[in-house]
Image (cartoon, grey):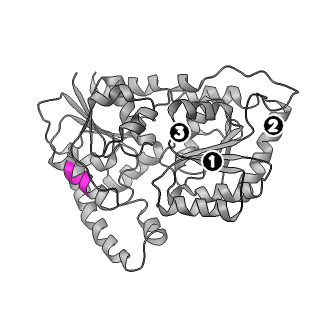
């Protein structure tokens, strides 16, 4: 079966992009997008797919032109007759459903800029004079996306959280298929324990992996590690230099004279795997995350997770078993849980490992692909 995968842009690789690339590889598909970073695709371990990735035209990096032009370009695209099935794996590519059937929309964040995060964006990101313009842009694009949504043949959500948003805003029932975790990459042999303490071969550091965006609340992690001078935090963060959130984080680190917080940008797939394997535990502070694949990558490596008790995290993290879900998360609660986890590890270094790996396998790539194939009759 000839399959085409649509994704809005591939110049900034996160969870949604990994899903699109995984679909392309596992289904032997072609991938259509706008902006492409071959370097970043290669770093994430997908260089073999480069001959099958096609750009339908470059678009600006700045919002809202980026989203608007992606939506317009996929609406104009017409590959009908060249493929037998179309998978929309990027939310701002959903307009591609209009000219391409049969299709499936695998929704991650069903155009959150227009719906779920609308009030947050107005409050946190916009100047007063920008808000009326934003309101008009939202109104126009809500109508467009609702119109395009009538062309979607199969609705699939990446979590129960996203399923509820699809029902709320698009009035459609979606099947839930959780994103794929390549657990084989992260399952590592148990490291010998020395002196009944933390594994000697593991550096004593905590890990955070996310985009530096306002709703990820990365500055909260920095505040926590100000209070933990004997601990170290490595933040693997995708960002563009000059972006305000990146600058804010750098200023906080500099002003606090923090030697124990490091931001790494665009590490390779192999380095990321090593960072998961070597960390004490994983921290995320993302607000109302759609699903959140990174917590499962950490659990696949046998590492406990500290995450907000909201969004997709409540579907993946088992509280007090594979980590801790925190209501009203703040820096003080992160500090206290870091201490709880380290005490558990000092008492029993394997305290979380078995439960974390077992839970991660529930989201393995093999399960994801089987369910997708069942929908498309592959």
Percent x, y of residue 54: 24, 36
The secondary element bearing badge 1 is classed as strand
39 vs 286: above or below: above
Residue that carries the numbered disc 3 in the rendered image: 267
Question: Which region of the structure is painted magenta?
Answer: 69-73
The secondary element bearing badge 2 is classed as helix
Q: Nearer the viewer, mark 3 or mark 2?
A: 3
Percent x, y of residue 228: 78, 53
Q: First in sequence: mark 1 or mark 2?
A: 1
Q: Quadrant of the N terminus?
A: top left
Q: Nearer the viewer, mark 1 or mark 3?
A: 3
Left or right: 76 as drawn, with respect to 142: left
Q: First in sequence: mark 1 or mark 3?
A: 3
Residue that carries the numbered disc 1 in the rendered image: 307
190 vs 248: above or below: above
Give the residue at x 28% y 71%: 136
**Whole-number angstrom distance, CA of label 3 to CA of label 2:** 30 Å
Residue that carries the numbered disc 2 in the rendered image: 344
Give the residue at x 36% y 41%: 37
Residue in front for this viewpoint, 116 or 294: 294
Give the residue at x 31% y 66%: 138
Give the residue at x 33% y 70%: 134
Q: Main secondary structure of the magenta part?
A: helix
**Whole-number angstrom distance, CA of label 1 to CA of label 3:** 22 Å
**Whole-number angstrom distance, CA of label 1 to CA of label 2:** 18 Å
Q: Is residue 108 magenta?
A: no
Q: Counting other residues with Cα less than 10 Å from the Cα at mark 1, is it few (<14), some (14-19), or many (20 or more)? A: many
* Most distant residue in the bottom direction: 129
Q: Quadrant of the C terminus?
A: top left
Residue in front for this viewpoint, 328 or 298: 298
Residue in front for this viewpoint, 83 or 106: 83
């Amino acid at each position: 079966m000839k399959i085409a995968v649509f994704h809005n842009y591939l110049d900034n690789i996160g969870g949604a992009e990994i899903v699109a690339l995984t679909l392309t590889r596992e289904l032997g598909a072609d991938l259509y997008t706008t902006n492409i970073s071959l370097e970043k695709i290669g770093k994430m371990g997908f260089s073999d797919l480069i001959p099958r990735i096609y750009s339908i035209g470059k678009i600006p990096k700045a919002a809202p032109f980026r989203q608007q032009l992606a939506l317009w370009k996929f609406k104009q695209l017409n590959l009908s007759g060249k493929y037998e099935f179309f998978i929309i794996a990027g939310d701002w590519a959903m307009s591609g459903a209009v000219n391409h059937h049969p299709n499936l929309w695998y929704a991650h964040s069903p155009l959150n800029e227009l719906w779920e995060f609308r009030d947050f964006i107005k409050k946190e990101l916009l100047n007063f004079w920008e808000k009326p313009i934003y309101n008009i842009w939202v109104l126009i694009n809500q109508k467009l996306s609702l119109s395009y949504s009538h062309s979607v043949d199969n609705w699939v959500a990446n979590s129960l959280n996203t399923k509820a948003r699809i029902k709320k805003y698009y009035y459609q029932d979606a099947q839930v298929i959780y994103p794929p975790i390549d657990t084989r990459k992260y399952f590592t042999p148990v490291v010998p324990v020395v002196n009944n303490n933390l594994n000697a071969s593991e550096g004593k550091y905590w890990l955070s992996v996310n985009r530096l965006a306002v709703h990820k609340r990365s500055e909260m992690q920095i505040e926590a590690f100000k209070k933990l001078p004997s601990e170290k935090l490595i933040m693997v963060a995708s960002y563009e230099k000059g972006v305000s959130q990146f600058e804010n984080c750098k200023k906080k680190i500099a002003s606090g004279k923090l030697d124990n917080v490091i931001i790494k940008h665009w590490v390779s797939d192999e380095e990321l795997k090593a960072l998961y394997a070597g960390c004490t535990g994983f921290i995320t502070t993302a607000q109302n995350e759609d699903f959140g694949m990174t917590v499962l990558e950490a659990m696949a490596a046998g590492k406990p997770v500290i995450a907000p008790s909201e969004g997709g995290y409540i579907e993946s993290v088992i509280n007090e078993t594979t980590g801790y879900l925190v209501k009203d998360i703040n820096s003080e609660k992160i500090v206290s849980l870091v201490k709880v986890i380290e005490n558990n590890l000092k008492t029993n270094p394997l305290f979380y490992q078995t439960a974390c790996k077992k839970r991660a396998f529930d989201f393995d790539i093999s399960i994801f692909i089987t369910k997708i194939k069942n929908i498309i009759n592959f």
